[in-house]
Amino acid sequence: MDVVLKKLALYLTDPTCYDPTATCQAIKDFEIDNVVATEATIYWTVPASPAAITDVKIQYSTDPAFGTVNTQVVTGYSQWTIINLLQDTTYYVRMVTSTAVSVDCCTSITLSFKTLLS
């Protein structure tokens, strides 16, 4: 059930980014795991053709509105561990994809997690 709800939320965020025929699509199967005091691992899948994804970024922030944002380019990967996080802090994470003709064309839903207290 959780997977179905997550996919529905992804689609409702921006339907064009989840259209299988779109040339720019959002990442798929986006999840957070292995959260500890100062790090968390993000997992995702890059969409197949016709999506011509040339750039994938993780954006994370302690601000749900992403007023202050940290960005990590993760093109070519399907998981990434965010390190040097603050303990006992809630973080918000989203993924942004680009193509050769459209920069930052699709943004995923925002997921959140709370780091542990050592």
Image: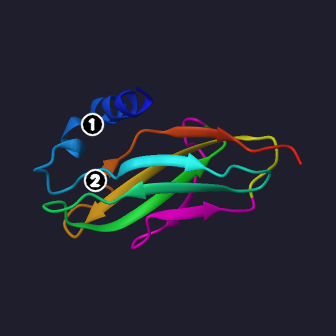
Quarter of the image for residue 78 reads bottom left
Residue 3: give x, y in percent of width and height: 39, 34
The magenta stretch spans which residues?
64-84
Question: What secondary structure is marked by label 1?
Answer: loop
Amino acid found under the numbered disc labelled 1: Asp
- Residue 15, percent across and down? 22, 36
Residue 29 is marked as none
Residue at 52% of width from left, 39% of height from top?
111
Residue at the image position 48 percent from the left and 68 percent from the top? 73
Q: Amino acid at mark 2?
A: Cys
102 and 42: which is toward the camera: 42
Residue 40 place in picture, x, y as percent? 66, 54
Q: Give the mark nearest the N terminus, 2 or 1.
A: 1
Q: Label 2 neighbourhood size at 10 Å, few (<14), some (14-19), many (20+)?
A: some
Q: Quadrant of residue 112?
A: top right
Please state if 80 lies on the left or on the right of 113 as rendered: left
Identify the residue under disc 2.
105
Which residue occupies 27% across, 36% down?
A: 14
Taking the magenta stretch, the answer to whether it contains residue 71 is yes
Above or below residue 113? Residue 69 is below
| Tag 1 residue | 14
Quadrant containing the N terminus in the rendered view: top left
Q: Residue at the far front: name it.
A: 1
Tally of marks: 2
Q: Disc 2 and disc 1: Cα gap in Å?
A: 10 Å
Q: Relative to residue 25, is residue 30 drawn left or right?
A: right
Characterize the magenta stretch by its predominant secondary structure. loop
Q: Is residue 53 left or right of residue 31?
A: left
